[in-house]
Image (tube, rainbow, N blue to C red):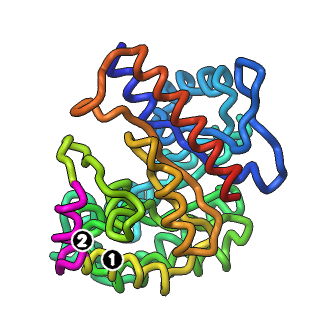
Amino acid sequence: MTNLVISILLTLLLGISCSKDGSDQDLSNGGSLSFAMGLSFPPVANSDQMSFTQPLLLELNVDRIRIGENWSSREPVEGQFNWAPLDERINWAERNNIELLLTIQSNGPNWACSTQQNSNSCVYNDNNKFKNYVEQLLQRYPNRISKIQFGNEWQSEFWYIGNERQFVEANNFVYNAIQEFSPHTDFVLGGFTTISLRFMAGCDGLITEFYDDEGNLYDETYLSSVCDSFPIQSIRDRIDYVLDNAFYDIADIHLYDDVENWDTYFQTISTMIDKPILISEFGGPNVNIEPETEQYQADQLGEYIKSIDDIIILFL
């Protein structure tokens, strides 16, 4: 049961799209939220999983989900596309009035990837071939996908091995293709990691300490010694370049664990962009430093939702 609860916390997805029509999402206790809530990466890989997921979405009053899309699965051999699995998911979502955020992974089939690659991403040999895949996707599902993003947590080379210029080039191919072939689809910039938000807030003097996912403490003394270092500055330069040069409609952030600082992280990113912000991942607790009991997890979930509701009211 503990693992299930943690999984639910880690997969909850929040979107601010409800602010477009001013609607609130009802809670079971009679209250309401100023944002709409969804699920990130629920099981929808096949018809059995979709049949399992659909009644749970109804029970949770959730009508938007985030799913992944992988070029490797769609075009394993150059020029030979396999759209049937994605067709099934898109059609299922439409039948059930579910909005989709489609995250196109920043990797690709072996034939399309250069030697610059890792298990999560690669730099493409020819961006025009990536462009063709994206255009084929959008022409197949024009205006049928609510939101699309390219890549995830690109601040780290672990999630995008290329440099910031290479990321922006691929990102902008997707954005421009959406404008041409699916103009009612919003394009979401790949998500900001919580650790990147923590370091930016810490190095800007907005917080004095924080823990990482492994439970290591970064205090004021440590931050003062590393904030001007090359590794930290190179990440900040990467972020600044992407925000200055990437095309997108909505920014995306991920919030985990230290809920007492979430409003500060939101404020930090809000000063850097002039776009709406979607929270595509939130959750916790950090089992390395926090209790693991089911009651604590349930209590923290309430704190997470309340914190985000307060953020939306304060900043939006």
The residue under label 2 is which amino acid type? Ile
Range of the magenta residues? 219-232
Q: Magenta stretch: residue 159 in it?
A: no
Front-most of 249 and 310? Answer: 310
Residue 12, image x, y percentages: 51, 37
Q: How far separated are the C-alphas under marks 1 and 2?
A: 16 Å
Quarter placement of the N terminus: top left
**Camera-side residue of 297 and 280:** 297
Tell me, for residue 64, which label it has, or none.
none
Determine whether 93 is above or below 174 in the image.
Answer: above
Query: Which circle's residue, 1 or 2, is located before the other in the chain?
Result: 2
Where is residue 38? Give x, y as percent: 60, 39
The kind of residue tagged 1 is Arg
Which residue corresponds to mark 2? 161
Q: Which residue is mark 1?
A: 236
**Image quarter of the C terminus:** bottom right
Position of residue 223 in the picture relative to residue 294 (left or right):
left
Q: Which residue is depicted at the point 17% across and 46% down?
A: 216
